[in-house]
Amino acid sequence: MANQSSFSGSTVDEAEIAHFSAMAAEWWSPTGKFRPLHKQNPTRLAFIRENIIAHFGLDEKAQSPFAGMNMLDIGCGGGLICEPMTRMGASMTGADASEVNIGIASTHAKENGLEIDYRATTAESMAEAGAQFDVVLAMEVVEHVSDVPLFIKACTSMVKPGGLMFMSTLNRTMKSWALAIIGAEYILRWLPVGTHQWDKFVTPDELEAAFENTALIMTRKEGMIYNPILDRWSRGADMDINYMVMCERPE
């Protein structure tokens, strides 16, 4: 079990929790305030699925390739990642600091006949309890926490030897300020104003540096690129705005 003193402090930004709790009723509306995440989800899931299958040598044609694996989605929100991962066979735990989000996620899972272990808690609390998973997911979360190094330390401690961690976030560039904040929040109104704070965006180099003092090694980075004409996201080398990473914990 992890030493409690090694995770002293908090990753919770109360203003961020209040902001997302206020929008929680719209988590499962594909045209609501979380529309961008619904649009991103196929791209995020493809990256996760492809790399888990390759890393663990699973059957890519199987309907439930993740059967027998336990996974954590930290900062799970309304469960947009937990539910499809459960349908692919994973035993999912979804954790979020917002009790309102967890309530929405739990209700939606029950309505769809899915068994998901949802918990209103934090990464550091779970790490202190010694939780361990084959795969840890932290998608669109790190830019909302109050202490990035502590969050990374807590998340990585929960990855079993031989396991994986996936993260997606926003790069801190002038392009991301222009498109992810000015464009998405003020012009297109995809998101409520104030959803993101540009100074909390994390560059790929900063994120990689945060992993240096952990047991994990960043082995893959990919950009997520939005095509406004097709209204669709795709994967590519451009990480100027949105990007995803995979980290491995050696055996």
Image (cartoon, rainbow, N blue to C red):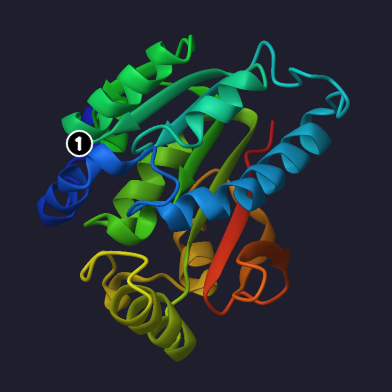
Describe residue 33's horizontal placement relative to residue 203 as left or right: left
Question: Picture quarter containing residue 194?
Answer: bottom left
Up/down of 15 relative to 129, above or below = below
In this view, the residue in front, 248 or 230, is 230
Instruction: Locate residue 210, reporting x and y percent.
Output: 44, 60
- Looking at the image, residue 68 sits to the left or right of residue 113; the answer is right
Q: Which residue is mark 1?
A: 98
Residue drawn at x 47%, y 40% is 156
Residue located 69% across and 48% down the image:
47
Helix, strand or loop at mark 1: loop
What quarter of the picture does the N terminus occupy? top left
Task: Point out residue 23 in the picture as x, y percentages from the top left corner.
Answer: 22, 47
To which quarter of the image does residue 65 belong? top right
Residue lying at 27% horizontally and 54% vertically, measured from the top left: 145
Residue in front for this viewpoint, 222 or 229: 229
Q: Residues within 10 Å of mark 1 (few under 14, many from 20)?
A: many
Looking at the picture, does residue 16 appear above or below residue 103? below
The correct choice, above or below, for 47 with respect to 159 in the image is: below
The location of residue 15, given as percent across then percent down, is 11, 56
Q: Quadrant where the C terminus lies? A: top right
Instruction: Kindly tell me whether residue 3 is visible in this rendering.
Output: no
Relative side of 172 to 12, left or right: right
- For the point 47% across and 74% down, the residue is 171
- Quadrant of the rendered structure where residue 64 is? top right
Left or right: 216 in relation to 56: left
Q: Looking at numbered disc 1 in the image, what kind of residue is underneath it? A: Ser
Q: Is residue 41 visible?
A: yes
